[in-house]
Amino acid sequence: MTAATADDATRRDFLYVASGAMGGVAVAAVAWPLIDQMNPSTAALALSSVEVPLDSIQVGQGITVKWRGQPLFVRRRTPEEIAKARAVDVASLPDPLANNDSLPENAPATDANRTTKPEWLVLKGVCTHLGCTPTISTPTDVQGEYGGWLCHCHGSQYDTAGRIRKGPAPRNLEVPPYAFLSDTRIKVG
């Protein structure tokens, strides 16, 4: 009789383990579609990056393109704008951090940390105060005191490197991750 009891215990243990394993597989089979539906759609993935041609942008001109449903500023800076941006003491800025997605969080807001190539400045076009879209300066229509961008809603002013200089905005305009595919084309995202 003891031999039958040992066999029953072994069989029972096997049934418990097998039932638990099958239950785990069933839960995973039900949960997977629920989890998978939270992944971004192919349409959203297609919008996650954008290529911008640079050959039509003149010196001193900037364009705005849409990226991830938000404005993206691409500006070809003049030598004077570059010199003006490089001359700024980072310690005098309201936000001394670069706010560049490609650099560590504590990188200083030097002009070199805000650009890949000095002539080209690429920024997310969203004011860091309340999410408005600032207006870009042009050589014939300078916006604000610093020649960069002006958010007319609340008066935030950004310089030629997209750094906050005056107004309620707490941070510099963000620099998205981007790379030069060639001298005349960049890929953002």
Image: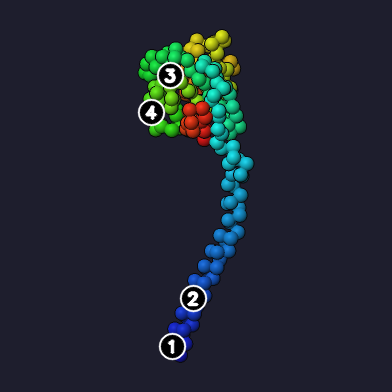
Say which element carries label 3: loop
Residue in front for this viewpoint, 175 or 95: 175
Distance from disc 1 to disc 2, alpha carbons, whole Å, reads 19 Å
Mark 4 or mark 2: whose residue is earlier in sequence: 2
At a point 61% along the width and 44% down the height, the residue shown is 42
Distance from disc 3 to disc 1, alpha carbons, whole Å, reads 82 Å
| Cβ atoms at labels 4 and 1 below 8 Å apart | no
| Cβ atoms at labels 3 and 1 below 8 Å apart | no
Query: Neighbour class for label 4 at 10 Å: few (<14), some, many (≥20)?
Result: some
| Cβ atoms at labels 1 and 2 below 8 Å apart | no
Mark 3 or 1: in front is 3
| Cβ atoms at labels 3 and 4 below 8 Å apart | no
Residue in front for this viewpoint, 17 or 140: 140
The residue identified by callout 1 is 2
Residue in front for this viewpoint, 180 or 29: 180
Residue in front for this viewpoint, 52 or 44: 52
Distance from disc 4 to disc 1, alpha carbons, whole Å, reads 74 Å
In the rendered image, the residue lying farthest to the bottom is: 1
Looking at the image, residue 100 lies above or below residue 146: below
The colour scheme applied to this rendered structure is rainbow
Distance from disc 3 to disc 2, alpha carbons, whole Å, reads 67 Å
Say which element carries label 1: helix
Distance from disc 3 to disc 4, alpha carbons, whole Å, reads 15 Å
| Cβ atoms at labels 4 and 2 below 8 Å apart | no
Q: Note whether residue 88 is visible.
A: no
Please tell me in which quadrant of the rendered image residue 73 appears.
Answer: top right
Residue 31 position in % (x across, y down): 58, 56
Residue 14 circle label: 2
